[in-house]
Image: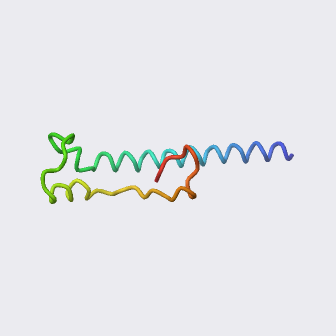
Amino acid sequence: MARRTTGLARFWRRAAEVMAECRYAQRRMFSLTTSADLYLADANHAPDTYAEFLFRTSGSLLHEPAATGRRHGRPVG
């Protein structure tokens, strides 16, 4: 019985990891598709004015946790 419980726990843990990865991918795709740099003709150059800089950084930014709160190799956000 314990072996069966361990297998079920492992299955649900893996399912939760897959769901978390899907959630992260969806949030990342949304932030990339709604970023201001996507609509600029030449996004590889620095902003010319402070107003342009503010426009480019007006999108949602991902919060980066402290180094102690991060696990090695895990995505930020």
Is 28 above or below relative to 65?
A: above
Q: Position of residue 45 (x, y in %)?
A: 18, 42
Kindly identify the residue that appears in the image at 78 percent across and 45 percent down: 6
Instruction: Decide which of 4, 33 is in the foreground and name it.
Output: 33
- Please state the horizontal and vertical placement of residue 1, each as a whole percent of the image: 86, 46
**Where is residue 50 drawn, in percent x and y?**
16, 59
Is 33 placed left or right of 13 in the picture? Answer: left
Check the image and tell me how it is coloured: rainbow
Q: Is residue 6 left or right of residue 18?
A: right
Count of numbered marks: 0
Position above or below: 69 against 19: below
* Left or right, residue 38 beside residue 15: left
Q: Which sits in the foreground, 4 or 28?
A: 28
Q: Which residue corresponds to the image point at 29% horizontal and 46% vertical from the top-left?
A: 33
Q: Residue at x 49, y 58 (%)?
A: 65
Image point 76% across, 42% down: which residue? 7
Percent position of residue 12, x then y: 67, 47
Figure quadrant of residue 52: bottom left
